[in-house]
Image (tube, rainbow, N blue to C red):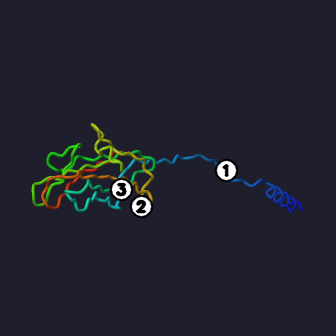
Amino acid sequence: MKTFTRALVAITVLGAAPAFAATTITSSISVTASVSANCTFAATPSTAVAFGTYDTLAGAPTATGTIVARCTKNTAYTLALGVGAGAGASYTGRFMTGAVTSDLLGYNLFTTAGLATVFGDGTGATSTVGGTGTGFGVAFNQTTNVFGRIPALQNVSADTYSDTVVVSLTY
């Protein structure tokens, strides 16, 4: 009986013993990232300022082209235009060069349809065009119009004229 009682007491004591609970402690880690400002010209092509056929006896034709850019959301940017590659070009008068002749056909580019402010690099009487990026992806294309005009009554030969103007995007 003593053995039975001892066994019963041992079972009771062991059964009543508290279970050892697992202990949990906590800490934390930082998660960080930096997003740098970025801009690019969009895959959607910019469009040329294409005047079509110029009639030397008619008025001053106008045309509109576009520059398409994308910038990181909330990134301020500025677009500037160079003077072009035509001989003697300046912001007061850009020139397209004839394909066959050496004639120069004068024109200029402007920031608005009113043709009041020359689109340039911000020096002299020229202005740049600024914007704020909305993000990357086709839905976020930022389109800027470029307005052009050819002055009337220019003494040039029948030819095809062209020029290349550098576009600078600063952010």
Give the Cα distance between marks 2 and 3: 10 Å
Mark 1 secondary-structure assignment: loop
Residue at image x 14%, y 53%?
155
Q: Name the residue under label 3.
A: 68
Quarter of the image for the C terminus: give it: top left
Q: Which residue occupies 21% across, 49% down?
A: 84
**Disc assigned to residue 138:** 2
Expressed as whole percent of the image width and height from the top left, the position of residue 61 reads 27, 56
User: Mark 1, mark 3: which one is toward the viewer?
Assistant: 3
**Amino acid beneath label 3:** Val
Q: What residue type is labelled 2?
A: Val
The tag earlier along the polypeptide, 1 or 2, is: 1
Identity of the residue furthest to the right in this view:
1
Q: Which amino acid does label 1 sit on?
A: Thr
Q: Which mark is residue 73?
A: none
**Is tag 1's residue or tag 3's residue first in the polypeptide sequence?**
1
Give the crowd class for mark 3: few <14, some 14-19, many >=20 residues within 10 Å.
Answer: some
Residue nearer the viewer, 1 or 7: 7
Q: Are marks 1 and 2 in contact (CB under 8 Å)?
A: no
Image quarter for residue 102? bottom left
User: Which residue is denoted by mark 1 in the rendering?
Assistant: 23
Left or right: where 101 falls relative to 153 = left
Q: In which quarter of the image is residue 159?
A: bottom left
